[in-house]
Image (spheres, rainbow, N blue to C red):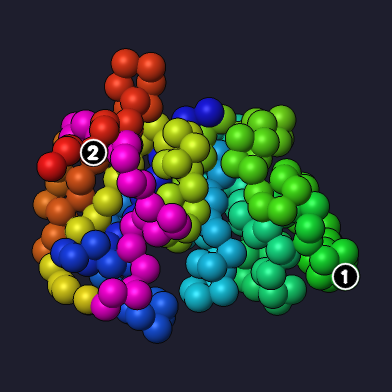
Amino acid sequence: MDVLVNAAMSADGKLSTVRREQVAISGPDDFARVDRLRAGSDAVAVGVGTVLADDPRLTVKDAALVERRREGGEPAQPMRVVADSRARTPPDARVLDDDAPTYLLVSEAADPDRLGALRRPGVEVAAVGEERVALERALVALADAGVASLLVEGGGELVFSFLEAGLVDRLSTFVGPQVIGGRDAPTLADGDGFLERFPALELVDVDRLDGGVVLHWRVDDGPEGGHRPAKEG
């Protein structure tokens, strides 16, 4: 499966403020770029933290892109995927509406009553881990559901987990012309952090957009590329 991580961050690498409120980091040109990325993907994934903070719909907005998917024999909208180990997604979240199918990835520790409130036509629930969502198992389940290309849009915890598991093929980051600051503000890759070996990135292209830049990276986690060790001293 091809896995692309895409995110918008400030010049200092923040996804939003310490209040974790949605911030307009990019502009209309980048919004259109993200819409094209969604239209070219089989599924779009976020973590439950993004659902709770932003309540995204995760659909393709441009009618022409939707029609192009239909003409190509694809569903009008890509599948929406939420990694939600404890089933914390609100039952009225927009990602559960009937605009597109939704795949909820939960763990076996998720509360059955919460799961019951989330089940409905168009929403598939899969337990892929004991206490937390196991991403390797999640990708197998998604592949069985017909997903060959996955766009991961955040947040920082989910992005870190994908990178830590060595499951990311490509990374695109819009870097905006502002500084947000805050030691506790979310970053591109939160989680526990890497201490000794870091995912190796190869910069393959740069685009100027909306007063900022889009950096296109290839992630090399193969046997010869792998994670680069930390420098000593």
Q: Residue at x 57, y 74 (%)?
A: 52
Q: Are marks 2 and 1 in contact (CB under 8 Å)?
A: no
Please determine whether, in this image, residue 92 is positioned above or below residue 169. Answer: below
Picture coordinates of residue 143, whole percent (x, y): 65, 31
Q: Residue at x 34, y 75 (%)?
A: 184
Any mark on residue 230, and which?
2
Which residue position holds label 1? 113
Q: Nearer the viewer, mark 2 or mark 1?
A: 2
Question: Is residue 149 or residue 156 the one in the foreground?
Answer: 156
Dot 2, crowdedness within 10 Å: few (<14), some or many (≥20)? few
Question: Is residue 5 or residue 190 the one in the foreground?
Answer: 190
* Quarter-of-image position of residue 229: top left
Dot 1, crowdedness within 10 Å: few (<14), some or many (≥20)? few
In the orientation shown, which residue stands out farthest toward the top?
224
Picture coordinates of residue 6, whole percent (x, y): 36, 50
Please determine whether, in this image, residue 183 is positioned above or below residue 198. Answer: below
Disc 2 is placed on an element classified as: loop
Residue 225, visible in the rendered structure: yes
Q: Earlier in the sequence, mark 2 or mark 1?
A: 1
Residue 62 shown left or right of residue 179 in the figure = right
Amino acid type assigned to the residue bearing label 2 in the image: Ala
Residue 173 shown left or right of residue 66 in the figure = left
State which region is magenta. 182-204
